[in-house]
Image (cartoon, helix red, strand yellow):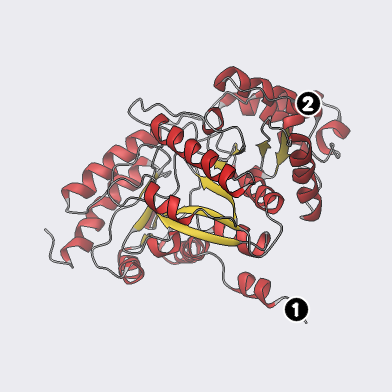
Amino acid sequence: MLNQELVGLGKKRSTIREIFEYGNARAKEVGRGNIFDFSIGNPNVPAPESVRRELLALLESGDPVALHGYTSAQGAEWVRESIAQSLNRRFCTRYTAGSIYMTAGAAAALSICFKTVTSSPADEIIVFAPYFPEYKVFIESGAGARCVEIPARPEDFQIDFGALERSLNEHTRAVVVNSPSNPAGAVYSEETLRRLAELLREKSGLFGHTIYLVSDEPYREIVYDGLPLPCPASFYAPTLMCYSYSKSLSLPGERIGYVAVPDVPEAASLYAGICGAGRVLGYVNAPSLFQHIAAKCAEETADLSIYAENRRILYEGLTKLGYRCVKPGGAFYLFPQTLEPDDRAFCERAKKYDLLLVPGSDFGAPGHMRISYCVQTSQVERALPLFARLAEEYGIR
């Protein structure tokens, strides 16, 4: 007998992926330039020159075994040391090579963390809606735990602390934060993180076990308007930092990231659990060639200014057309309200104009849509008249 849960997951991809594949098929019919695909967070800006330069140098002079062979399961030691020191310089942390576990992107990092901190179907991990839909898959199907959704404050997508406190209980093993967030672009302030840390410390003491903070940080470098971006690990010691170079270096397909394990009393066991989870999940080791790139280009970024311009054009354009939207502080997504309560019906209607949008229901926030603006600026500009025509269908001019 096959695992029917996994069969079901395989038969139905995430809605984001379904829309992305629809766009690929539709492009064959009408041409790629006529498709306004805002479905997937696939960076359109090229990787920085330093990545190309390092890759060429490695391929021309590097040891083939070192570049393409196995590394230690947790990653090459020199790579982990380099990344640890980079984090310490930037965030005043105290990581060492023994704190870092290299992963195949943030998805693998999250999956490993969820697997490590849970051991029973009664265990719970809290996420704030709207949230990246795969969290639920990683938590429930991957770790066998329960995903508890708490709606964020609708006016700004910040944490609703009253709802969080009511949901924390003896089964809570972790809380997930994602700042800047996907899909809303919310950025948590220092005050928010301090309050969160105080609450988790209080409840950890009350329930007699550590409630871990799992910090999903792939959009760390994409912040607008000079907003400060505090490091969650600086406020709450039991924080598992999950990172990917997919967005900062525009390398989503290369699948390279890491987990940074905190310096806490149970650090040795926690790190061993991370290694064990990677073993159970069959990750073997992160891509060896791009471990080199991660170490050598850890503090580089692609030209992220393009996203700032896209945000400006799209936010100003849509709000002038009558769409209601919280202005994002980071990441590269807009999360407006749809013009009818049924967000799936709205996004389906948008396909008439070849506008490919993702329903907010998939992120735990019905009545919204996610627009991924990590696309060419010309696509954003050419899409605005189509958004206007769509709004006219709802009597908005």
Q: Position of residue 270 (x, y in %)?
A: 74, 41
Label for residue 60?
A: 2
Image quarter of the N terminus: bottom right
Residue at (68% x, 59% y) in the render: 143
Residue 106, above or below 38: above
Residue 2 tag number? 1
What is the residue that sits farthest to the bottom in this orientation?
Answer: 1
**Looking at the picture, which amino acid does disc 1 mark?**
Leu
- Asked which secondary structure carries label 2, the reply is helix
Camera-side residue of 334 and 373: 334
> In terms of depth relative to the viewer, which is nearer, 206 or 168?
206
Question: Which residue is nearer to you in this view: 313 or 137?
Answer: 137
Frontmost of labels 2 and 1 is 1
Q: Position of residue 276 (x, y in %)?
A: 80, 48
* 312 to the left or right of 76: left
Q: Is residue 350 left or right of residue 82?
A: left
